[in-house]
Amino acid sequence: MADRIIINEVGPRDGIQSQDGELSLEQRRLFIQALLDAGIRHLEMGSFVSPRAVPQMAGTDDLARSLEVPADVHLSALVPNTKGYELAREAGVKTVAVVASATDTMNQKNIRMSLDQTMRVCLEIIERGSREGVRVQAYLAVAYECPFEGSTNPAVVIDLAAQLLESGATELVVADTIGAANPAQVKQLMGTLAASHPVERLACHFHDTRALGLANVYAAIEQGIRRFDASVGGLGGCPFAPGAKGNVATEDVVMLCEQMGFETGVDMPALLEVVDLIGSMLGRTQGGRAHYWLSKNAA
Ligand code: COA
Ligand code: ZN
């Protein structure tokens, strides 16, 4: 059997959160449904955050309740704090994602907490999750570079990663929030983490700001990583991290993986239709680097 790569689609959260204008809940639901129909099995469906901070994510509770999820689909939602965790749990969400940024300033800008406070909250949610049957994925944001503090100290990332994994986070997602990493750095950091933790519990999240998204995915694959976040059409960006462009496009990552002989389970023609669908909902053409070529050649 071919080696499998898990694509965690984050378009419905990271993709939409920074777009001008809000999609209706029905549009968000149709978007998610189309992604599931294209074979996506891991998907971040939204976030339980302050609607004042991120109006695009308002109503994620109603959205979660309205989704009919097949047994093999793993839906997650981002929660920035305990209140978000409780709202997600009440809405029946089985997997939540907590986010610790590796620098103080980024935590302050994103969720108005220091790094220490953020880690306390994350560890508490991880601990509650394991008692209450909720899977908790931990994100380490600005793992390579922070828009406010510059280069991130890898020793800090390695220490925070160990704390999050040892406390029971199901996965650790190393996030290049602003798309500043290069493949040599990815090789170094993911290689170090993979030497101390099971690779099945490690994942990567790249943004394609400097067109290095796919190269970074490749560098992580070489270090044994088999779980990647991606956003269909290359949508995305964090409203609190200036300069961040879209996530690495799902269609680009699927193309890379499949051409290298990995299985993703994603149906490319159907995925390209989702690129068109979200483009029409947002009123702007979307598509990753390979979209033009894939549109003409994906069978
Ligand atoms: N979901 C919904 N509402 C929330 C909430 C959550 N997870 N956490 C707090 N709130 C509400 C509070 O109830 C309060 O509402 P009120 O004014 O009606 O009483 C209000 O938000 C302010 O609460 P407070 O604890 O003072 O929060 P804050 O103003 O310090 O903001 C966050 C903190 C985390 C809520 C806010 O910064 C946020 O939602 N950030 C989202 C960041 C994000 O999504 N980043 C991108 C992904 S990494
Ligand atoms: Zn992101």
Image (spheres, grey):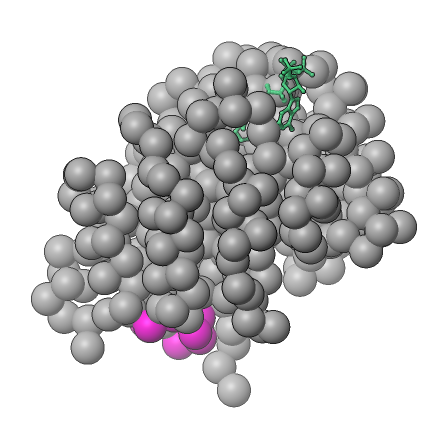
Q: Is 245 above or below relative to 97?
A: above
Give 290 or 92, whichever is nearer the viewer. Answer: 92
> Which residue is painted at 30% across and 28% down in the image?
21
* Left/right of residue 166 with respect to residue 26 in the rendered view: right
> Which residue is painted at 51% across and 18% down in the image?
52
* Left/right of residue 227 with respect to residue 168 in the rendered view: left
User: Ligand 1 quadrant?
Assistant: top right
Q: Quadrant of the C terminus?
A: bottom left
Residue 39 placement (x, y as % from top left): 41, 70
Residue 211 placement (x, y as % from top left): 29, 40
Any part of residue 43 in sight: yes
Within the image, what quadrant is residue 37 found in? bottom left
Is 256 one of the magenta-colored residues?
Answer: no
Within the image, what quadrant is residue 36 found in? bottom left
Residue at the farthest bottom position: 1
Q: Is 93 above or below relative to 112?
A: below
Residue 29 placement (x, y as % from top left): 41, 52
Residue at the farthest right position: 131
Give 297 or 266, whichever is nearer the viewer. Answer: 266
> Which residue is painted at 51% across and 37% down in the image?
59
Residue 285 placement (x, y as % from top left): 16, 43
Give 277 or 168, whichever is nearer the viewer. Answer: 277
Q: Which residues are magenta?
A: 259-267
Any part of residue 249 in sight: no
> Which residue is painted at 43% across and 74% down in the image?
265
Within the image, what quadrant is residue 183 found in? top left
The count of marks equals 0
State whether the magenta stretch is mostly helix, strand or loop.
loop
